[in-house]
Image (cartoon, grey):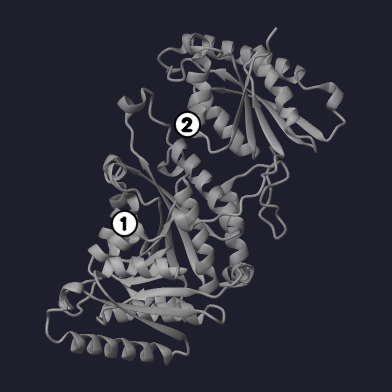
Amino acid sequence: MRDCSLGEDCDPLCRDGSRDYKKRAKISMAKTKRRGAFGRLKLENESVRKHAMNILCATDFSDSAKRAADVAAGMVAKSETGSTVQLLHSVPDWLVSAEMPGTALLAERSDGDLEREALRLRHAGISVRKDLRYGPPAEEVLLAAEDHPPHLVIMGSTGAGLGSRWLIGSVAERVASLVPVPILVVRNSEPLLGWLRKERPLRVLCAVDFTVSADAAMAYIKQLLSWGPVHVEAAHVTPEKGDSDTGRKPSVPAQGGETEETTSLERDIWERLHDALGDLPIEVYVRPCAGNSAATFLELAREREADLLVVGSDQRHGMRRLAAPSFSHGVIVHSQTNVLCVPVKSFHPDYTVPTIRNVLVATDFSPAGNHAILYAQSLLPFGGRIKLFHVCHDPSPSVNPIIASEIYFEHSMAVTKEKDEAETTIASLIPRQLSTSAILFSSEVVVHGDAAEAIREAAGKFGADVICMGTHGRNRATSVLLGSTVQRLISKSTIPIFVAHAPRV
């Protein structure tokens, strides 16, 4: 592996294809500084196409609802011609019973309040459409979103309208759990309004894992970029497991007190965001959690002083929510700052066929492992790179060289001999007839106590698009290898894994 400089023209992927996310993050930050405080963000804004926005804003005329309406007006003003705010107010149906006197007066008063709020927003030069309804507020907001699907729903977090504080908590929570479009719950409008006026960047903390709901959340950040400069941070909350949970030793701490697993997760999350958002400077935080993941995420949000939390949601209901409490629901209920919840239903990705250029082949020199090399070649009809990889198992990494010096010496000699033999064997597996073709072969042998972890780390460093492996398993009795190494790798890796069976004789 060659080191690369961080000069002006440095290729982020490096010449050897290494994907060191921290190095690439430094490159992104360096480019941002050279272009000015918001230079890189403005460049990203230019690549995000603006479009007409229909924003549904629910109001009860309270101060918090008016501030939410101001945010809606600011977003519409930043959008293309034809954008509009659908200003909705719903009078609870228990106040407008046909037997109740003064129904007409109440309707007239509500209509007057709605007209005055619409006029206030129109002073900003935007289009406002009134929508006065009668019925339970949450139900009416959902019906309005069904009648004329908006691009975004905006609601204040608290309210004090006629007869009840109908925007408090439960209404926003119910709408967020059912509405098929993104919803912004405004709790602190000042940073949002300052951002829309381009007085300051918006500090966004996005919850990211490896699910489609996270894809939906990341995709909406592109829309935020079209409205103003955004400073993006990402958080990944992972369950905290002890020795008894895994049956394995704890990960070895890396520099800065981080574990190898944490560093690897940070890299995977950064790569995921980089693929989705491009060359933005992004900071990634991985936090272990022994209990409520939403509470851990909100604690980090307070530490980072985030202006907006962006979360995806698959909108689970009934027994599915009881079996696994909703992360997005917990964030909306307990957050002290603004929350943007993006449901999976609103996410319509333009999936393209991935291009495979780099394949890591992990082999144990068995017929099945070596046969995977042929499948790796079949994945690269137009050329690419294949790295053959072998792990020499280190059975006793915890041997103290001082206490058991003789055992340690014998062990070291045996491992060194095994590695030398493996390097000779793996070099012989490179097809000589393809040495001049468009496929470039390389090989590597490492000594590691955990084969699955070693393969995952090597795939990340190599920049592998696919991992190829062989397995002997044809039935339950012979699927031990699949259960011990391949299956553990599948549970850890975010890279597709191609598993090949041994050839039949």
| Horizontal relation, residue 211 to residue 137: left or right | right
* Element assignment for label 2: helix
**Kind of residue at disc 2:** Ser
Q: Are marks 2 and 1 in contact (CB under 8 Å)?
A: no
Residue 141, percent across and down?
Answer: 33, 69
In the figure, is residue 247 to the left or right of 124? left
Q: Position of residue 329 (x, y in %)?
A: 30, 55
Q: Residue visible at 56% across and 82% down?
A: 81
- In-front residue for pair 151/216: 151
Residue 18 appears in the rendering: yes
Q: Which corner quadrant of the image does residue 253 belong to?
A: top left
Name the residue: 46% across, 17% down: 401
Residue beneath label 1, please?
331
Q: Mark 1 falls on what kind of element?
A: helix
Q: Sequence-wise, which precedes: disc 2 or disc 1?
A: 1
Q: Quadrant of the C terminus?
A: top right
Q: Residue at x 18, y 80 (%)?
A: 162
Among the 4 quarters of the image, the one containing residue 94: bottom left
- The residue type indicated by label 1 comes to Val
In this view, 485 is above or below 306: above
Q: Residue furthest top?
A: 505
Q: Residue at x 68, y 51 (%)?
A: 5
| Residue located beneath label 2 in the image | 491
Number of marks drawn: 2
What is the quadrant of the N terminus in the image?
top right
Of 274 and 149, the residue lying toward us? 149
Where residue 118 appears, x then y in whole percent? 37, 87
Q: Position of residue 325 (x, y in %)?
A: 29, 46
Residue that protrudes farthest toward the front in the picture: 99
Corner quadrant of residue 87: bottom left
Task: Tell me the distance, in whole angstroms, between the alpha carbons under discs 2 and 1.
Answer: 27 Å
Residue 442 visible from this viewpoint:
no
